Image (spheres, grey):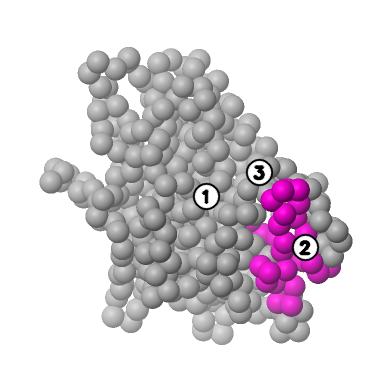
Amino acid sequence: MWPRPEFDTMRESIGTCRTRSTMISWMPWAAACLWGMATLFGLAGEPALRRFEFSQAHMGTLFRIIVYAPDAATASRASNAAFQRIATLDNTMTDYSPSSELMSLCRKAGEPPVRVSEDLYRVLAQAQELAARTNGAFDVTVGPVMRLWRRARRQREMPDAAELARARKLVGYRKLRLDPRARTVQLLEKGMRLDLGGIAKGYAADEALAVLKQYGITRALVVAGGEMAASAPPPGRDGWRIGIAPLQSPEKPPTRFLMLREAAVSTSGDAEQYVELNGTRYSHIVDPRTGMGVVGRSSVTVVAPKATASDSLATAVSVLGPEQGLELIRSTPGTAVLIIRATDRGPRIFELNLSPYAAPAAGQSPP
């Protein structure tokens, strides 16, 4: 469950904390969390629009859809269609259901190529592109290793070294082959397992926003765990106001804000999903190249044109670290990043290309 957000007369705060695991917690001012604020003003000359909000649980988190529509019936029809699209994608890409298309594909690892749906192929193609660009820092074939680390967090003990070594042999994006003409996928080694936790929710948010537009909803925000996909802003506003909670004091209000329109933002961090073993803090985010959980406390916030990109890039930057992560963002058009890392001397901040999205702090007037 998630707590009810606090309201005032002019705005609403939407809190969501990103974790890349089975369940995702929603809590006020959580570390590595995103906060969206939508006002209720109208725009002169525009048909009167009212604000509506809907929520449903999918993909291990709570999806929230906020729309501005002329009436409740329109808003309800559009949101229901968007949630149906999300549910379809959940049934396609989850690795928790044996009947999902993804798990059906994994059961055929080591066998001939398998023809897959357009959605699954599209996500895998984008994942493979990023895997090649990051030399495997982002890699959806990490499934066998992720299973061990999920168990490690539950049992609070390190993965068995021998099991981890065997699992690592099944990981590697070059072991995953795609044929765009035939729209087939082949997992080259028996026992391989895919994990789309670092990209699927972003894709679902993008697709939900597209469905809303098909129903004539052009002002909307889709929140999917740590992913937010925004279309045009609320009436009378320049954008959707997104707050980034402090890393060291997550219970406090955000001090940095972004303003988004026709864009997406994702935050990746270890605020909720981590385990401390033998004095070391391991994130739920795993480096596919080493098979080890990322160490240290950090958050990565990425802005991109689409949530599919911001979701996967946030994971990749978390694995790569600041130096290589900044280079990745620098080489990706239309993206920006904020990296906050905890050190003995306090938070260390790295950022790139954030100026176009900067918003004044609460209570301040725009420059």
- Identity of the residue drawn at 32% across and 15% down: 48
**Side (left or right) of 38 relative to 154:** left
Horizontal placement of 298 versus 122: left or right? left
For the residue marked with disc 3, what is the amino acid?
Answer: Asp
The percent coordinates of residue 219 (x first, y second) are 39, 29
Q: Secondary structure at mark 3?
A: helix
The residue located at (34%, 62%) in the rendering is 338
Front position in the image: 94 or 326: 326
Instruction: Name the element at disc 2.
Output: strand
Verify whether residue 189 appears in magenta.
yes
Q: Which residues are magenta?
A: 168-196
| Res. 46 image quadrant | top left
- SS category of the residue bearing label 1: helix
Q: Earlier in the sequence, mark 2 or mark 3?
A: 3
Q: Which residue in the structure is indicated by mark 3?
A: 119
Which mark, residue 187?
2
Q: Nearer the viewer, residue 12 or 81?
A: 81
Name which residue type carries label 1.
Thr
As measured in the structure, the alpha-carbon distance from the residue carrying label 1 to the one carrying label 3 is 12 Å
Position in image of residue 233 (x %, y %): 33, 33
User: Considering the image in quadrants, where does the N terminus appear?
Assistant: top right
